[in-house]
Image (cartoon, helix red, strand yellow):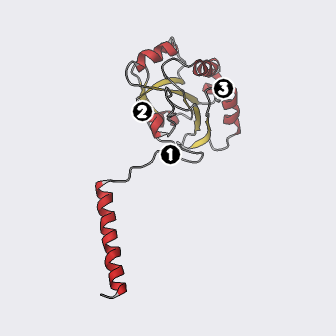
Amino acid sequence: MSMSFQSRVIRSIFVVLAAVVLLVFPVSAQAQTPDIGMKAPDFTLSTASGTPVQLSKLTEKGLVVLVFLRGYPGYNDPFCQQQVRDFLISWQPFATRNTQLVFVYPGPAKDIAEHAKKFLVDQDQLPENFHLVLDPDYTLTNLYDLRWKAEQETAYPATFLINSKGNIVYRKIGRTYSERTTAFGMLRAIVSVKDH
């Protein structure tokens, strides 16, 4: 056997083996945190009372501020509660700008609705543009690659501004409990983004 023929045979064997490995152990798609200019992954999650909320339906109405909370890491985080209260107080300027506010509350599926009800009392009286949705077992948190994998942790605090085409025009990922967007900061971002 000539050297070149032998090389081709060995290469062919490697190609066949690689194909077999890929068939047996397919490469799974790695979640990636969506960035500015990317399409926001669509989702449908429910509120604590069971009302479904779909991102693509909300973007049909205008802008969407999508906020990932820490949810329930064994307690209701006071930083999250303060952030939500800040946006609740300022809901009207967002409504005036056709902006929906969506807060994602992640945590273990068991009792997540009860924890969310304690997190935000009077959820039945929220403004029409304000939504607190449950993310049981971190499905959406994982899709957006925001899972904080330290012990007793849930998700990194993160905020996305999504335009009516479903594209992300602003994002902020916090790496500490207190690194978060404010309602005032988001209103400024809405005014400054050109693509909405």
The amino acid sitting under disc 2 is: Thr
- Say which residue label 2 marks: 44
SS under mark 1: loop
Looking at the picture, does residue 11 appear above or below residue 40? Answer: below
SS under mark 2: strand
Looking at the picture, does residue 185 appear above or below residue 19? Answer: above
Q: Is residue 21 left or right of residue 68?
A: left
SS under mark 3: helix
Residue 7 in the image: x percent, y percent? Answer: 36, 80
Residue 110 in the image: x percent, y percent? Answer: 37, 21
Dot 1 or dot 2: first in sequence order is 1
Quadrant of the rendered structure where residue 19 is? Answer: bottom left
The amino acid sitting under disc 1 is: Gln
Residue 24 in the image: x percent, y percent? Answer: 28, 55
Whether the residues at callouts 1 and 3 have beta carbons within 8 Å, the answer is no
Q: Identify the disc placed on residue 116.
A: none
Which label sits in the foreground, 1 or 2?
1
Dot 1 or dot 3: first in sequence order is 1
Q: CA distance from mark 3 to mark 2?
A: 24 Å
Q: CA distance from mark 1 to mark 2?
A: 19 Å
Q: Identify the disc placed on residue 183.
A: 3
Give whichever of 38, 14 is nearer the camera: 14
Give whichever of 95, 84 is nearer the camera: 84
Residue 3 in the image: x percent, y percent? Answer: 36, 85
Q: Quadrant of the C terminus?
A: top right
User: Which residue corresponds to the image point at 67% horizontal and 41% vertical from the top-left?
Assistant: 193
Dot 3 or dot 2: first in sequence order is 2
User: Which residue corresponds to the image point at 57% horizontal and 42% vertical from the top-left?
Assistant: 168
- Say which residue label 1 marks: 32
User: Which residue corresponds to the image point at 45% horizontal and 37% vertical from the top-left?
Assistant: 142
